[in-house]
Image (tube, grey):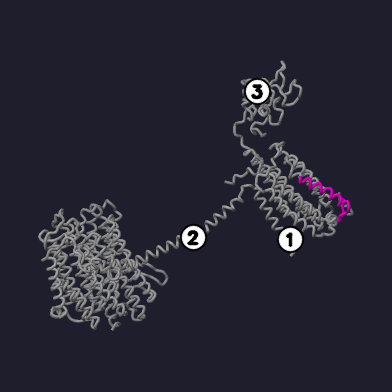
Amino acid sequence: MDPMNYIVLAAIVFTIGAVGVLVRRNAIIVFMCVELMLNACNLAFVAFSRMHGGIEGQVIAFFVMVVAAAEVVVGLAIIMQIFRTRRSASIDDANLLKN
Amino acid sequence: MNTVPLQTTAVSAAVGGGEAATFYVLGTLVVLAALGVVFSRKAVYSALMMAVVMIGLAVFYGINQAPFLMVVQIVVYTGAVLMLFLFVLMLVGVSSSDSLVETIRGHRLLTAVIALCFLVPLVSGLAAITAGEPVGLSAGVAAAGGSIPWIAGEIIYRYVIAFEATGALLITAVLGALVLAHSARTKKKRTQRQMSQDRIRGDHPTPLPGPGTYARHNAIDMPALLPDGSVSQLSINPVLAARNPELQHGVPEDLSYSIGAAPDEKPDTAASDNDGQREDEGSWTR
Amino acid sequence: MTSMLAADVHAVTTAADGGVLSYAWLMIALPLLGAAVLLLGGRRTNAWGHWLAIAAALASFVWAVLSLVQLLGRTPEERSVSVHVYQWIKVGGFDIDLSLLVDPLSITFALLITGVGSLIHIYSVGYMAHDENRRRFFAYLNLFVAAMLVLVLADNYAVLFLGWEGVGLASYLLIGFWQHKPSAAVAAKKAFLINRVGDIGLLVSIMLLFTTFGTVAFSPVFGAVDGAGQGVMTAVGLLLLLGACGKSAQLPLQAWLLDAMEGPTPVSALIHAATMVTAGVYLIVRSGPIFEAAPTAQLVVTIVGAATLLAGAIIGCAKDDIKKALAGSTMSQIGYMTLAAGLGPIGYAAAIAHLVTHGFFKAGLFLGAGSVMHAMNDEVDMRRYGGLRTVMPVTFATFGAGYLAIIGVPFLSGWWTKEGIIQAAFDSGGLTGQILGWVTVLGAGLTAFYMSRIMFLTFFGEKRWAEDAHPHESPTTMTVPMIVLAVGSVALGAVLVVNYTLAHFLAPVVGAPHHEFDLVHMLTSPYSLAALALMVVGVGYAWLRYARSEVPVTAPKGNFITVAAREELYGNAINEGLFMRPGQQLTRAAVAFDDHAVDGVVNGVARSVRAASENLRLMQTGFARSYALTMLFGAAVVLATTLGVNLA
């Protein structure tokens, strides 16, 4: 099996995540789809790391995880706050910037 | 020092037949689970599907000679991040299911077309590349005295500034989450003394009857039966009573009017669900 | 000859060495201060403001007299005194000092301005007694005096221009003094605009002088004139003439003067008869060396003067409005002066002498006209006058003195000075001299006719008064200045001309007289006899038409010359046809171009942008998902491009 298959799998998962971001309206699911995309990237990094025999891919994947964790914390807090004030977790309702 | 490196995953650089089998089986599972994340009606199912994807990816990390990331993936992502998602889901409403009807005209079709336009060239382009045998990490691992020492060395020495920066980022994120999640108290906190006074002055100094007491079903939506066999409306959570018109009959006015508000005087027996003790968060359920 | 003239004309300019002359700027400062106090003081100064203005003008006059005395105490070569006040502009090599030049020419003007000005200030106390804005009027009068003194006392063209614009402003303010009358407001605007045309000429000539000589001060410029090219000097001369035409109401910029009579009569007397309108003559005489270096320009000056002389006289013959008839006369008389100034050194002294006497008798005539109007409820139509000599004896006497002076009755002021001009014209020699000379003689006859017409219509014949008219003699504040001016009208000419007193006084500036004073020649030369004869004919014809025969109250139709003269020789029609209509067409075209072409482009761009944004706006759904879709689209494009590049 060609190790490029991992990359192809990463591409597929990434696209699915992107479609989820675009199609779903529930902010929490959208967030999960973002995580899906990040994970797909991580898979690609890890596969590349193995293909090239360097550890950098894993290091970067590690950093991606850390940043994703931070992002989740803040993002979910924002979702909570919006839900509290607007009684809705739909991202279509968060349109205060539209006139 | 002829110590054998602490190598937990004994996978060689070359891609063997077993790995291929694992890839195809697990890869299919991961793709299906990812689709499940996107297309589940209920957010909870999405979260569960997400867990499947993450664990699948953790296995792939392991196969790809990344034992540290495998562990981190399971502990941090599946364990911490996903649990955070679930907590928030519960706060927002576990059982709430989204309408899947698209509100933006043509959005879904356009998304599909563009996603295909993105995926097909990407996959075909990737498929055109033949990477050959992977180099593998064994040599580096051996030199560094282990996979984890190697990553540690890289992070601590070479990427130390990025590492410190992520530390700062995490602290900032924690503070941000604290600020965002904090809600100011809009009315003065009731003291225990006030609560007891209100209770004595109110209609029911004694606790209200718990639901289901002496009833055939021990459930919170079953009213308690009084000694004479009649139904005690007081035993029902006012929220439930408000939702089910059948239950509203005979509910005391002071309770029926306070539906949705903080249930001040509600005894523990009537507050079997988690919302019972909250004062300032108001009603969480829609 | 020119260089020799330049040498003896311009005596050495010495710096003031203390005394009255060092403080020559006081002459300007006092009326300026008066104007400032009156304008800034507001109503508080209403009660005594006019007395302050008179005091300022009189003080200025006294200072001018003292300066004259001090000048006379010097030898003729040292009578050119420069008074440095302060450095006005210094930019690199361009520096202009605000300095004054007190010499015989400028002191003559200063005396005329402050003397006649003071008299008219006094007259105005009575004339404007019932005007609630009298204080403002006096402030403007003071402002005018100050500006006019700046004009004549300047020792360089830049400061002269400052005064030039200052008198233009004062003239505008005073013509439009009764701005509640639309005609006055329009007349003020007209005067201002036509003066602008002349001012451009003056300004451009100053710029030309600067680029040619690197300075605009009088003495360096005049000293360097010989080195400059004929073409440049002709251009400068013609442009200076344009400026002079604007200010002095000479053809072709004459149209504003008759309308300027909308201003109060003292203004007409001071500004539009005695002083400001002579600024053009002053400019030409002062710039004598430039004109002497440009014979073409000189010739044009004489032609303009001759043409205006006749045009003004013809207009004066037909106007029924007493002030406009006098204004036509002013045009004509200034034409005399311009003609004389254009003759060169031979005519400068004659021009200035006529200017001074004209200042007196024309001011007297205007004040008399004002007195008549004052008595006749501001009626200006001479056909409604008649027989006023018994009712207003003082006005009649003073007006009569001015009348006799202007028509050139021998031994009165006008005769002395006009004879000087006629003689100078014939003396200039050649065919041009003959033509110009006969024009001046003919002008004398016309002057006699139109002035007699005014005289007879106003003071003789039947009473043709309006029913509510109750004429009466004017108050003392008005008659005293008239009497003083009448005395000047009678005697001043003799004082100035006998033995060429003024000419010898002016000699350091304009050159010595060309021949000795010869009274017998003046009386017996064929030209002066011809002028005398024409004068008698003019007076006689006017007597027949306006004193002996019935004068209709409404003007008869008249022949085409009369109609043309009443229409001011179609000056306004020419202006309208040549400039106003094409100008309006041009502005209309510009407006149309702006509306359709410029605005069309702008609006078209705006409209298309608007239309485009109307459509693009739809992309702004407010849904984050739509925007994210755009991002994915962008990513797909980037991907496709990358692949395409790699595959290619």
Q: Quadrant of the C terminus of chain C?
A: bottom right
The quadrant of the picture occupied by the N terminus of chain C is bottom left
Q: Mark 2 and mark 1 in contact (Cβ < 8 Å)? A: no
Asked if labels 2 and 3 touch by Cβ distance under 8 angstroms, the answer is no
Q: Main secondary structure of the magenta part?
A: helix
Which residue does the numbered mark 2 point to in the structure image? Answer: C600
The amino acid marked with disc number 3 is: Val
Residue B39: x %, y % from top left:
74, 44
**Residue B121 sits in quarter:** bottom right
Crowding around mark 3 (Cα neighbors within 10 Å: few <14, some 14 to 19, many 20+) is some
Q: Chain of mark 2?
A: C
| Secondary structure category for the residue under label 2 | helix
Q: Is residue C21 visible?
A: no
Q: How far apart are the alpha carbons under marks 3 and 2?
A: 75 Å
Q: Is residue B129 magenta?
A: no
Give me the C-alpha separation between circle 1 and circle 2: 46 Å
Three-letter code, disc 2: Gly
The residue tagged 1 is: C643
Q: Is residue C200 above or below residue C230?
A: above
Label 1 to label 3: alpha-carbon separation: 70 Å
* Chain hosting mark 3: B
Residue positioned most to the top? B228
Q: Are marks 3 and 2 on the same chain?
A: no
Q: Which residues are magenta?
A: B9-35
Tell us which disc is closer to us: 1 or 2: 2
Label 1 sits on what residue type? Leu
Mark 1 belongs to chain: C
Percent x, y for residue C638?
70, 58
- Is B32 in the magenta? yes
